[in-house]
Image (cartoon, rainbow, N blue to C red):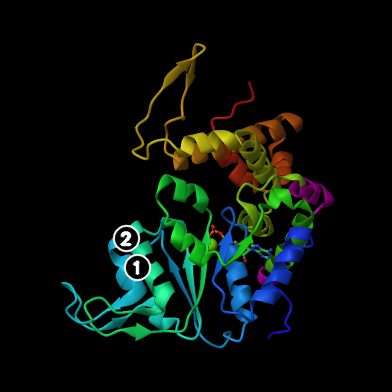
Amino acid sequence: MSRRQSKIIGKSPQIVKIRELINQVAGTNLNVLICGESGVGKELVAQELYLRSPRATKPFVKINCAAIPRELLESELFGYSKGAFTGASHDKPGKFEMANQGVLFLDEIGDMPLELQAKLLQVLQDGQFSRLGSPKDLKVDTWIMAATNQDLEENIRKGTFREDLYYRLNIIKIYIPPLRERKEDIGLLISHFYKEFRKEYPKTRFQLTREIREYLEDYPWPGNVRELRNVVQRLVILRDWQTLKAELDLRRQEGPREQETAAAPASGVQEKKEVDGQEEVGVFLPLKEVKRRAIEEAERKAILSVLHKTNWNRRKAAEILQISYKALLYKIKQHQITSS
Ligand SMILES: Nc1ncnc2c1ncn2[C@@H]1O[C@H](COP(=O)(O)OP(=O)(O)OP(=O)(O)O)[C@@H](O)[C@H]1O
Ligand SMILES: [Mg+2]
């Protein structure tokens, strides 16, 4: 088993435990179910298990059950033989076959359609399957890992996930808690990504100050490690801390509201409501549009407040905002900011 350093950064008791569990499980073929919110590192954990296992020299094959249309998912998984359906002009192996002797990572398993769950269960039970349109039984030796950000037990209650499949997959469960519940990892992750991006962009003049660090260490990170990585990358490249801070402040205030909006129809039907005599716009806007407006508003506010502070000294304001003088003039015009 590999002695290399773990790629999973963190010193919280939860992450220390996960690293230990990975070492114990990596030598086995027990099915693993990895759960946790989006961006917590589920795929990273799957890769770490694989890299530490004797299968590390064999393929790691991933299939995202949410990204592939349901009609295609079955043939992607199990393959097909020539003539199995219109357009099947040649034999094609599925991901199960490709993962022979290696790992099959079923990402977003909570989105797998029920019919396919039945077929998957059968394969897991007797290790046999056939390509679509082929009578030949195939047997492969694959280590199954699955991941989800959904509550599968709740899905079982709702009838959208099979209980028997759940127990088959859930032999070893690895739950990765959200970053806000393991704040002691944030500092290490910031340093880690900062180093990574300084190496990637050696010409950057960005300096991670104590103020930025303290702010980021206290931020709740609804998008977890992925969001943190993106933020550090953006800071190293764009050096726009003031704008970014305004955006993060806003996201912090509006967090729960964004979730409400997520449930709104995707059709983009715009509805305006009167609440206490005030027009409430945006509740039924598509999430993307809500985000765009929130970011614009945050940017406008940040620029305005710096202009006030500098008594409308635009050169100084541009310096503080870490954008060029020309860019500031453009933004003042774009946001129709006036000194009155
Ligand atoms: N503990 C960690 N140490 C170092 N990097 C991490 C850690 N956790 C996550 N990352 C990094 O954060 C990013 C997101 O992780 P990953 O893709 O594994 O998340 P996920 O849980 O699969 O997200 P999603 O549910 O959205 O698919 C990746 O770039 C990954 O390398
Ligand atoms: Mg993932």
Quadrant of res 6: bottom right
Type of residue at label 2?
Glu
Residue type at mark 1 is Lys
Q: Is residue 202 visible?
A: no
- Residue sitting at 42 percent across and 35 percent down? 264
Query: Which of the image's four quarters has the N terminus?
Result: bottom right
**215 displayed left or right of 84:** right
Q: Is residue 312 above or below residue 217?
A: above
Q: Position of residue 130 (x, y in %)?
A: 30, 79
Please name the residue that numbered disc 1 is placed on.
119
Question: Left of 144 or right of it: where is 271?
Answer: left
Whole-percent x and y of residue 252? 65, 38
Of 147 and 27, the residue lying toward us: 27
- Extreme right residue here? 210
Check disc 2: other Cα within 10 Å, few if <14, some if 14-19, many if 20+: few
Q: Position of residue 20 (x, y in %)?
A: 73, 71
As measured in the structure, the alpha-carbon distance from the residue carrying label 2 to the one carrying label 1 is 7 Å
Q: Residue at x 61, y 80 (%)?
A: 28
